[in-house]
Image (cartoon, rainbow, N blue to C red):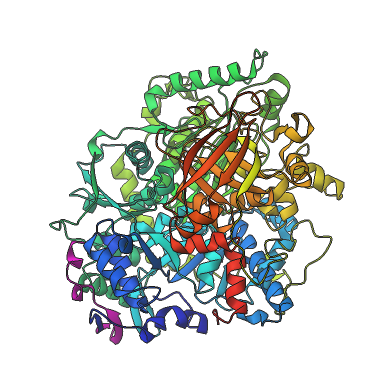
Amino acid sequence: MSTAPNTAASKTAATSATAGPDSFGSLARLALGGESYRVHRLDAVPGSERLPLSHKILLENLLRHEDGHTVTAEHITALVRGGSDAAHDVVAFSPSRVFLHDTNGVPVLTDLAALRDAVAAAGGDPRSVRPRIPSHLTVDHSVATEVSGRADALRRNVEIEYTRNAERYRFLKWGETLDGVHVVPPGTGIMHQINLEYLASVVERRDGWAFPDTCAGTDSHTTMVNALGVLAWGVGGVEAEVALLGQPLSMLVPPVVGVELTGELGPGVTATDLVLTVVETLRAHGVVGKFVEFTGDAVARIPLAHRATISNMCPEFGATAAMFPIDDATTGYLRLTGRTPGHVAAVETYAKEQGLWHDPAANPRYDERLRIDLSTVTASLAGPRRPQDRVPLAAMPANATAAIERVRASRDEEPQGSEIPDGAIAIAAITSCTNTSNPHVMVAAGLLARNARVRGLTVKPWVKTSLAPGSKTVTEYLARAGLTGPLDELGFQLVGYGCMTCIGNSGPLLPAAAEAVAERGAVVASVLSGNRNFDGRINNDVSLNYLASPPLVVAYALAGSVEHDLTTEPLGVGADGEPVLLADLWPDDAEIDEVVRAHLTPELFREAYTDVFGGDEHWAGVPASEGHHFAWEPDSTYLRRPPFLDEVAETVAAPADVTGARTLVLLGDSVTTDHISPAGRIPAASSAGRYLTALGETDLNTYASRRGNFEVMVRGGFANPRLANLLAPDAAGGVTPDFTRDGVLVPIHEASVSYAAAGVPLIVIAGQEYGTGSSRDWAAKTTSLLKVRAVLAQSFERIHRSNLVALGVLPLQFLDGDSAASLGLDGTEEFDLSGIAGVVEDPARPLTVRVRPADRPAFEFSVRARLDTPREAAYYANGGVLPYVHRLILRGELD
């Protein structure tokens, strides 16, 4: 089944290679499904048989797009040969499609709309700004868990969603007028689960060509379809714009880590337990910027749904992609989810002919190797602040107690008496495609709920419970299995089909919990089946957040506290007066498998996706906009023309050095994109809240919903209350000293305005793993709009570093052994950055930082400019991707 429409936009990507050379004689014909397709045979390239799966797919992409300029025979030869020569280091990758969600997709479309305006103003044709490859935009990030624990929760949340987001949804309908953009309406599901169950083709057949399905997505969990053998990864919104406009993504060829899986999972061990072990192991090993491929004798025994859970959490262990091979499990899943028999046969034939089918005897050329024994995996959670911090179930009480004590110490206050104690679970959410795409853990949650109700157990009254699956298939098979009722009775009613709690759209706490936090300072927790638990992400009032499997979410809702020992203490007292242990309720694997086999059918999936682009009556009622230009409304608080193309000159000036820069924020390790640009509810007292209130807004909504308005987003920059700015160690996040006013603490946006008025450039200084987490391009956009010229960090997470470059912000990396602490930097100094034009010419050159402290002599040190490819250097020299593309269009180089 080819899901990409046969449009002019789709033809460009598939057929562009025909004009280029075929240096390896790889062009051939292959019969698939009774038709003959053009293919580039990988076995025509000597040495390709030793390549890992991901590099074979890269090879096919290069062969198909070889043009003698952007992709050359030397690039192809170097990829196959391996090594570290310059030709091998950088390649141009052209994804076959782009995948967006609404909160990142709206900024993408506002940028394209602004680009159309800028091209027209310069005398060009605005219609030249159009997608060249197919794209899907799924509306799944806007619905919030405002109402829960009641039968009408879904209806009420949908009504609230449409009321809040009517303006944004009208804009998305205008976006559908751009050729090649297809919107999956609200209420359909979560983008990655829809991609896995429906959109991903594995092998694409388009306009007479057959080639591997590849995808660039504006969400870091785009990697979920790696489970199907689809090479896909998360990119920033600006990179997605570049790909949509037909430009290749310039990338360093990632080294590949082969992870050998051995042994078998023990009884009662879930896919969530497995993935938390994988995250812990690979984050400790170090796989940032690398491809991971799973191999070994145990791979064949891992169900596709378990593979998807692992691949989904690829960004949590830091890799670019997490590939599983194409094999019988892949084709079995394609059949289960309703793909046509002809398409499934085509996938198998193509994969076997191209050497992409799993061969257990193969010995690919991995750059690193690692082994994980599945028999060592045990029941686990992760938290309380990072997904890589795995906690064995038996160790949870001690972990939670220590975490509570740390929070108490940081607040320097004593808890006051409360019926809701520290460690109480305020949120228990079955959420996120990470786990709701896995029928085994969802059925386990339903069976555990059934068993709990049989024994007469109920959820503690302060726990906000919710069920937010990633597709309608989940609620259908739960209903068919008779498990909806027990979940409902425990408060896990359906609240919506979307990301919801996992991305911070958790809504308000129940009144009792909210009062305990606000009035008595209770330290409360969440337990969710999501993929991220960064500080301040889930809910501003929740201090501790733990990731867990869906059945453990149900169990903790019954227990009511993260300090409860589920391995030894009863979850409650049953209707018969007897204590009930978790072991009494936990379903066995055979029963779970029986329910899955009985109630999951191809017909179930086909029915769920019959009209995937149609939407409900709410979507039908959203008025459509037309015209080559979007009609911006000057008083809108949701959509404003972004300023990234304001005053773009026709010619490019050499980047100037930076003199007399001040530090806007001084940060430590593991600063996330949530810290830099929060997604959750906008506090009324924040800079963004005060701005909106002054405009008469009463429903402030979330930062994620306001990403089409740069005025809101720039005021949200570094405004997460959990951000630790070392320049203001005793204050909550969002403030910094303004050295133009004797160091008085002010909101960060206010400080930026003050520095700009004084002509003082700004930098950000950070530690290791800067920019972890979501692919959120607004973390880079807000940095740029705050007038930050450079970010100096010990290391960067891949997507955020590339986003900074795309916004014209220079990422600088301390040399090995150096850090702000080792160099004695406290953020009060003035900084000069010299040699910027030189590093644009040659990024390998060191850049000199001169430090001018007020109380000691000036000194210098060298840093590395992280412009990793020539194309990135060109983006930076142009002031970012959008000015670069704007100039290409005006020069007629992007038709």
Q: Is residue 456 magenta?
A: no
Quarter of the image where the N terminus is located: bottom left
Position in image of residue 392 (x %, y %): 37, 28
Q: Nearer the viewer, residue 72 or 703?
A: 72
Q: Is residue 43 magenta?
A: yes
* Residue 381 x %, y %: 42, 33
Give the number of marks: 0
Q: Nearer the viewer, residue 828 or 718?
A: 828
Residue 666: tell me if it is visible: yes
- Is residue 150 in view? no
Residue farthest along the left direction in this orientation:
361
Look at the picture and state if 281 lies above or below 570. Answer: below
Q: Does residue 807 sit above or below 491 in this rendering?
A: below
* Residue 227 image offset from top left, x and y in percent: 34, 56
Q: Does residue 322 sit above or below 654 in this rendering?
A: above
Quarter of the picture containing the C terminus is: bottom right
Quadrant hosting residue 720: top right
Q: Residue furthest front?
A: 857
Residue 645 vertical placement versus 706 (above, below): below
The quarter of the displayed image where residue 278 is located: top left
From the viewer's perspective, tell me whether residue 309 is left or right of residue 473: left
Which is more toward the observer, 587 or 359? Answer: 359
- Span colored in magenta: 29-51
